């Protein structure tokens, strides 16, 4: 049975809407007769040819550039034909329809490509590994310059190369151990001779460095969710506006102004922060109307899912018994404290902030004048776990970070077996194998079909 991976495919490769140029792309094996039938000429490999794109009646649909990349020297590794036309949606739809129509006679299985299918072919034909294919999508999705640069770095193979180097070091060490296992009489001296512990330490240090860079990359890709919380009127909406540099949320002196959440993605040093302004948390049994009560329930739901909570306090009201009690009540519900930054607002109008408790993150700001905002941004990056990476970050996904963590756990178990009195070499080798396989999931050396389907289905059409 022929798999869907063998069907020739076609799609509009450029973004929907109008553009200066639009591209229809065909990929499959044995496209040469099809190209001849579609365009009436044979195209020179990898040369731009300006020519009419004829419709069914022989009249040109458009004039444009045709490119033909014979297999295997193409993006997908198959024959690829590109029609670079004027970028109008109707022109491109007509060209697409014409490609399918000619396909019915000359390329019977030609069909529309599914999302990500061109890149999936590139992966299946070993043009890209899985981490690089994912970087293609991440490059297109990148919302900041830093994210785009690191996606480009991963696409060119920097991440994969480090993963592969680690895998090779693991294989070498494993082969050494397994050779020893075959000659048990020599086992005794193995660890000293091969310096297995030293090699393992080296692998572990390299793995930690890659994990750190990948974690930074995942941060650039996913960002973190930051919730602004506190009593009514403390200046949450003002802070959102100050962070965003735009009047997004309504600010008034009336407590209870914000009811529904207002979200905005901002960036600090290229790290996306998804900031959510919420309804002020009214303490105790204080009356709030129905709308505000629902708003407050939603605030708590947002706090549940937050990576960081900015707990705002109003410096002009510190010391008011009712106000202080309200803050204490919120603080009691806001555990665990690790994700919290205490933000003392209205520095321009209020008292000096209290001294921070040990281990507490706190900053005094004025959302109005901008005082303290740089320190707040610095604290947010620190909370996110961001630190400058001299060698540059490569984009990575949560699944890569998980695989690296699993590999690190197996390396640690291997270390324990090597250090144990009985030096269980078979178990040592087995843990190394598991670490090696975990890394293989990153580049797609071992990856279940359903995971592949899941990854590529999230691409846009025509990619
Ligand atoms: N017009 C156009 N621009 C594009 C793409 C495309 O498919 N078409 N790309 C699509 O994402 C990206 C470029 N990616 C590409 C990757 C490899 C090959 C390619 O022909 N590779 C051959 C030959 C390499 C060489 O000559 O050195 C190969 O790998 O064998 C083409 C595009 C971005 N720009
Ligand atoms: N002096 C001074 N006033 C501020 C500052 N930040 C906010 N305010 C004022 O405090 C009042 C409340 O600000 P908001 O940003 O609406 O407060 P909020 O926490 O969003 O309030 P709710 O949505 O009602 O929970 C407004 O009158 C703001 O102008 C500040 O840094 N200094
Ligand atoms: Mg508000």
Image (cartoon, rainbow, N blue to C red):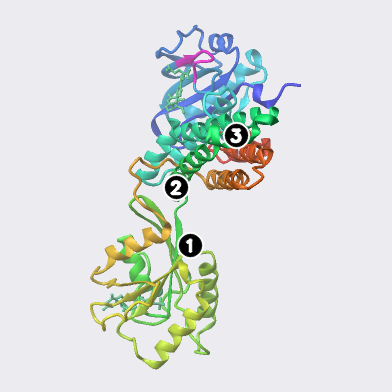
Quarter residue 235 falls in: bottom left
Q: Residue at x 43, y 30 (%)?
A: 156
Q: Residue at x 42, y 58 (%)?
A: 384
Circle 1 SS class: loop
Does the Cβ of the disc 1 residue fall within 8 Å of ligand 2? Answer: no
Q: Residue at x 49, y 28 (%)?
A: 92
Is residue 73 in the magenta section? yes
Q: Which mark is residue 427?
A: none
User: Is 278 rendered above or below residue 136?
Assistant: below
Q: Which residue is mark 1?
A: 307
Q: Which residue is mark 3?
A: 189
Q: Is residue 125 visible?
A: yes
| Image position of 438 (left or right of 213) | right
User: Is 35 rendered above or below residue 193?
Assistant: above
What x and y, as percent, mark residue 425? 66, 38
Residue mark closest to the camera, 2 vs 3: 3
What x and y, as percent, mark residue 321? 39, 93
| Image position of 348 (left or right of 453) | left
Residue 3 vs residue 345, the one in the foreground: 345
Circle 2/circle 3 CB separation < 8 Å: no
User: Is 283 rendered above or below residue 37?
Assistant: below
* Quadrant of the rendered image holding ligand 3: bottom left
Report the magenta residues as a range.
67-74
Residue 181 vs residue 80, the one in the foreground: 181
What x and y, as percent, mark residue 203? 50, 39
Q: Residue at x 48, y 37 (%)?
A: 135
Q: Earlier in the sequence, mark 2 or mark 3?
A: 3
Q: Earlier in the sequence, mark 2 or mark 1?
A: 2
Q: Which mark is residue 212?
A: 2
Residue mark closest to the camera, 3 vs 1: 3
């Amino acid at each position: 049975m022929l798999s869907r991976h063998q069907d020739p495919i076609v799609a509009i490769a450029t973004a929907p809407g109008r553009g200066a140029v639009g591209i229809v792309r065909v990929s499959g094996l044995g496209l040469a007769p099809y190209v001849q039938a579609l365009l009436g000429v044979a195209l020179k490999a990898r040369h731009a040819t300006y020519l009419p794109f004829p419709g069914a009646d022989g009249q040109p649909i458009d004039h444009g550039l045709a490119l033909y990349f014979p297999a295997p020297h193409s993006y997908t590794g198959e024959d690829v034909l590109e029609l670079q036309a004027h970028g109008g949606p109707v022109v491109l739809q007509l060209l697409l329809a014409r490609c399918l129509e000619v396909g019915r006679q000359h390329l019977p299985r030609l069909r529309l490509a599914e999302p990500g299918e061109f890149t999936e072919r590139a992966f299946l034909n070993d043009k890209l590994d899985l981490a690089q294919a994912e970087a293609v999508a991440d490059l297109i999705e990148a919302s900041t310059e830093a994210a785009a640069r690191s996606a480009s770095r991963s696409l060119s193979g920097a991440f994969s190369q480090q993963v592969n180097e680690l895998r090779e070091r693991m294989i070498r060490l494993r082969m050494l151990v397994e050779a020893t296992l075959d000659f048990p009489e020599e086992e005794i001296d193995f660890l000293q001779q091969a310096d297995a512990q030293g090699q393992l330490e080296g692998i572990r240090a390299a793995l930690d460095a890659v994990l750190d860079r990948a974690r930074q990359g995942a941060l650039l890709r996913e960002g973190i969710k930051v919730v602004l919380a506190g009593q009514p009127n403390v200046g949450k909406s003002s802070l959102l506006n100050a962070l965003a540099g735009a009047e997004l949320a309504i600010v008034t002196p009336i407590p209870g102004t914000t009811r529904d959440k207002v979200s905005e993605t901002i960036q600090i040093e290229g790290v996306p922060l998804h900031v959510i302004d919420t309804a002020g948390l009214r303490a105790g049994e204080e009356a709030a109307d129905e709308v505000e009560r629902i708003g407050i329930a939603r605030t708590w739901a947002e706090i549940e899912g937050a990576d960081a909570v900015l707990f705002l306090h109003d410096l002009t009201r510190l010391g008011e018994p009712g106000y202080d009690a309200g803050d204490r009540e919120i603080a009691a519900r806001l555990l665990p404290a690790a994700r919290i930054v205490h933000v003392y607002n209205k520095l321009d109008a209020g008292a000096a902030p209290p001294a921070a408790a040990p281990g507490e993150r706190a900053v005094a700001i004025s959302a109005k004048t901008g005082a303290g905002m740089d320190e707040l941004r610095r604290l947010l990056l620190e909370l996110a776990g961001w630190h400058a990476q001299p060698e540059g970050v490569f984009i990575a996904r949560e699944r890569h970070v998980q695989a690296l963590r699993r590999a690190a756990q197996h390396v640690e178990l291997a270390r324990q077996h090597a250090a144990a009195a009985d030096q269980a070499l078979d178990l040592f080798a087995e843990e190394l194998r598991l670490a090696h396989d975990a890394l293989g999931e990153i580049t797609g050396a071992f990856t279940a079909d359903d995971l592949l389907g899941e990854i590529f289905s999230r691409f846009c059409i025509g990619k």
